[in-house]
Structure formats: C-alpha cells, structure tokens
Image (cartoon, rainbow, N blue to C red):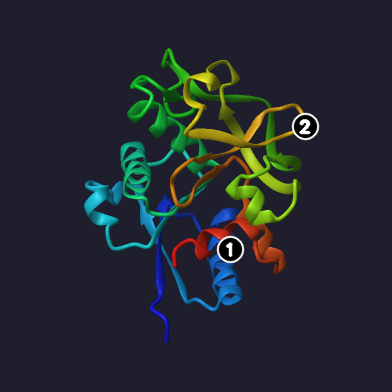
Amino acid sequence: MAATLRIALVGDHNPKLIPHQAIPEALRLAGEALGEPVEGVWTHTSSLTNPALQLEGFDGIWCIPASPYANMEGALGAIQFARESGRPFLGTCGGFQHALIEYARNVCGLPDAEHAESNPSAAFHLISPLSCALIEKTGDMFLDEGSLIRKAYGEARITEGFHCTYGLNHDYSSLVLGQELRATAHDADGEVRAVELRGHPFFIGTLFQPERKALSGEVPPLVRAFVASLK
C-alpha cells in the first residue's frame, strides 16, 4: 500500500467555516481520484514557532482561509519554508494574501509590506480592501496559457467561489509580480485572482476557494493537481 501523503493545513481551524468543512473532503476526493491516501493535518499558526523544523515531515503545505491568523509570523514562516524548500504549496484566500506578503518581504526587499486587516495603521498595505467585497459570491476568471493553474483546470475560463474582502493592492502589484511570481488568473476587470511561482514544482495562491466544489461531490481540479504534485 502506498504511503499516506501528509499535508500541513496551516491556519486556524474553525469547523463552522465552509472552506474548513470543504478542505478535508477536497483532499479525500482528490486522493481517491489519484489512488493515493492523503491526510490533512490541521496546523494552528499559534503552534508554529519554528516552521522549517516543524513542517519538514510534511509532503505539502496548504495555507488555508480565515485570516487574520493568530500568529501571522508563523503562517509567513510556513510559506517561506515551502517556497525555499520546493515543497508543494497551495494558498487559498488568506493563504494567497499571505503568500504575497511573504514574497514581498523576503524576496522583493519590502519588509514593511502589510495586510490592511491585521495592521490597519500600516503605511504600506500590499493587501487592501477590495473595491467590491466578494462575500459568498462566485466569479468568472481567465487563466493564462502555459500556467500550472491552466493545466490543472484544462480550460481557459473557470467559475469559482469567493468569501473575501481583501486582495492584492493594484497600486503595488508591479512591486511583487514579475518574472518569478506572476499573476496567472484575472477576473473580467483584470484584477489578479491567482499567482504562481515560476521554477517551483508547485506554488500557487488563489484569492478564490477552489475547495468549495468538494461539498457538492466534485473533485476540485486545483486540489487534485496539488495532491498529484506531492508524489
């Protein structure tokens, strides 16, 4: 029997939240589709005092929705570990937002990059309120040709669910997006809805919550691709 693939679910688990209900089911369905046993391990950010050491034994890292996190530095450390170690990474909603902050701080030389929700008085809000909140909304997005996310879905246009009020600040997007970290999904207005890291085996962040499809019995294509990358 194949060894169980273990994924650290980095965030602050709340069983009342829809995406947190969906994530275990999404992993189960993806594992069954691929014929691979998969285990998601809830990893509260408050427990992450040395992410690189604590997450070494996991095959992949998923930074989950529902921020601000109890320990933002722990979440950022987990993302940094995944990025630097080549460990497959998926960040959805809050995970997408914090992946951008981690990259800005540690790669782009922007240590003051902040999230407006967790630090509203900061001068540099890389993550800022959306012009129109996406609370329990669905939206269409367009995927870049040649991207990992396009390959995962197998189509150029997708519809996914959101539950968020913050996203990438358009005024600062050029400071973090470029040759390595690039936007690979946009809405009809051109707003960034997903990013991926070039040269990494699998490093994708989405503002939407692809895991939600699992609650209707559908294998979420992006979760399937994430699990497939662990092997």
The image shows residue 21 at horizontal and vertical percentages of 57, 61
How far is disc 2 from disc 1 in space, using C-alphas? 26 Å
Q: Is residue 115 left or right of residue 53?
A: right
Q: Is residue 15 left or right of residue 51?
A: right
Identity of the residue drawn at 68% across and 55% down:
153
The label on residue 188 is: 2
Q: Residues within 10 Å of mark 1 (few under 14, many from 20)?
A: many
Q: Quadrant of residue 166?
A: top right
Q: Quadrant of residue 216?
A: bottom right
Total marks placed: 2
The label on residue 4 is: none
Camera-side residue of 175 and 145: 145
In the rendered image, the vertical position of residue 138 relative to residue 40, given as above or below: above
> Please, what is the three-letter code of the amino acid marked with disc 1?
Arg
Q: Disc 1 on helix, strand or loop?
A: helix
The image shows residue 16 at horizontal and vertical percentages of 55, 56
Q: Are marks 2 and 1 in contact (CB under 8 Å)?
A: no
The image shows residue 59 at horizontal and vertical percentages of 37, 62
> Please, what is the three-letter code of the amino acid marked with disc 2?
Ala
Camera-side residue of 27 and 34: 34
Camera-side residue of 87 and 45: 87
Identity of the residue drawn at 28% across and 63% down:
57
Q: Which quadrant, please, contains the C terminus?
A: bottom left
Q: Please give the residue where the numbered disc 1 appears in the rendered image.
A: 224
In the rendered image, the vertical position of residue 165 relative to residue 217, given as above or below: above
Q: Is residue 26 left or right of residue 160?
A: left
Who comes first in sequence, dot 2 or dot 1?
2
Q: Residues within 10 Å of mark 2 (few under 14, many from 20)?
A: few
Q: Disc 2 on helix, strand or loop?
A: loop
